[in-house]
Amino acid sequence: MIRSEICEMLGLRYPVFQGGMAWIADGKLAAAVSQGGGLGIIAAGNAPAETVREQVRTARTLTAGPIGVNIMLMSPFADEIARMVVEEKVEVVTTGAGNPSRYMDSWKQAGIRVIPVVASVAMAKLMTRLGASALIAEGGESGGHVGELTTMALVPQICDATTLPVLAAGGIADGRGAAAVFLLGACGIQMGTRFLSAEECTVHPLYKEKIIKATDLCTMVTGKRLGHPVRSLRTPFVRAYAKAEYGGMPDEELEALASGALRLAVQEGDNERGCFLAGQVAAMVKKEQPAAEIIREVMEETEALLLRAPQWIK
């Protein structure tokens, strides 16, 4: 069995995190992942603190394993959620879409392990200086908000820039991807798109169907003009948004155009108006299965590949 320093730090059976996907990663999915030996993470997204608190408490009723909360720092409720995770004694906080510096001291004093998502060496160095417990190096292959560098290029550079444990995210859906990033220096992985197919994931059935039927060129990135690029499936809405983005629509109207699109995809399966977030590995997701089975399958394949490594050297 593969065990790494992140397993020892957090008390995990497997070095696997589930990505904090807004409107998707709720208490039920997070609990299933934690119960399966990984770290389940509840996405705060743009939800108010009390809504996120309910999901944390739901997860607590379903697993005794550690639970994480992902805080999107652009959220208008970020301050409230930052206090809530302390009150609820959440074990791990991951962060994205911003700089968590102003919250770090209070989280660390509460015993919370702070593990920011980083997309550059500069941010990795800053988070290391501020006392993060580990880092998630996320490449642009991932779904949702993305950076410029690919996982293959980003992970080794982050590993060289910090003494902290580094998990890799973006473009990982099976043991081949996991084995590759372990060889790049990572000590664990974070998967988002693969867990969209988990039985415990409560997205609309059409969302799961679109992921399972996805092809290699099924995603595209929009939002670069506004400075917040997002990767999602190519739907009528996303194509229309891309046309508006480079067609001269004012920024305020462009922001309004995207408002609520993810919720429409997740809750209603609206193919015409919904934004279905997904990473480039969507085509590698073949079936719906329990979260625990996903974790076990990926880790068993990873271990088998790494054990073969000496055979490749003649």
Image (cartoon, rainbow, N blue to C red):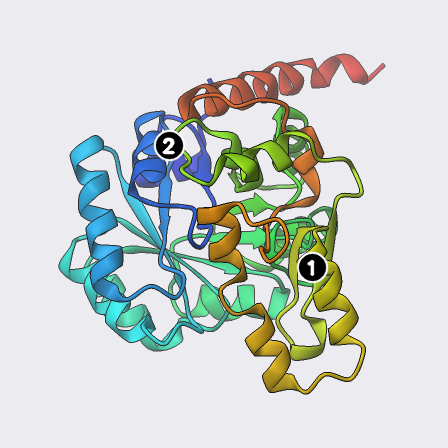
Q: Amino acid at mark 2?
A: Val
Q: Residues within 10 Å of mark 2 (few under 14, many from 20)?
A: many
Question: Please, is residue 232 above or below residue 62 in the view?
Answer: below
The tag on residue 33 is: 2
- What is the residue that sits farthest to the right in this orientation? 314
147 and 287: which is toward the camera: 287
Q: Residues within 10 Å of mark 1 (few under 14, many from 20)?
A: many
Q: How many numbered marks have been drawn onto this rendered protein structure? A: 2
> First in sequence: mark 1 or mark 2?
2
Q: Residue at x 16, y 55 (%)?
A: 88
Residue 84 quadrant: bottom left
The residue wearing badge 1 is 238
Q: Amino acid at mark 1?
A: Val
Q: Position of residue 66 (x, y in %)?
A: 26, 39
Question: Please, is residue 154 above or below residue 213 in the view?
Answer: below
Q: What secondary structure is marked by label 2?
A: helix
Instruction: Evaluate whether residue 21 shows in this view.
Output: yes
Q: Position of residue 103 (x, y in %)?
A: 31, 72
The answer to whether residue 25 is left or right of residue 126 is left
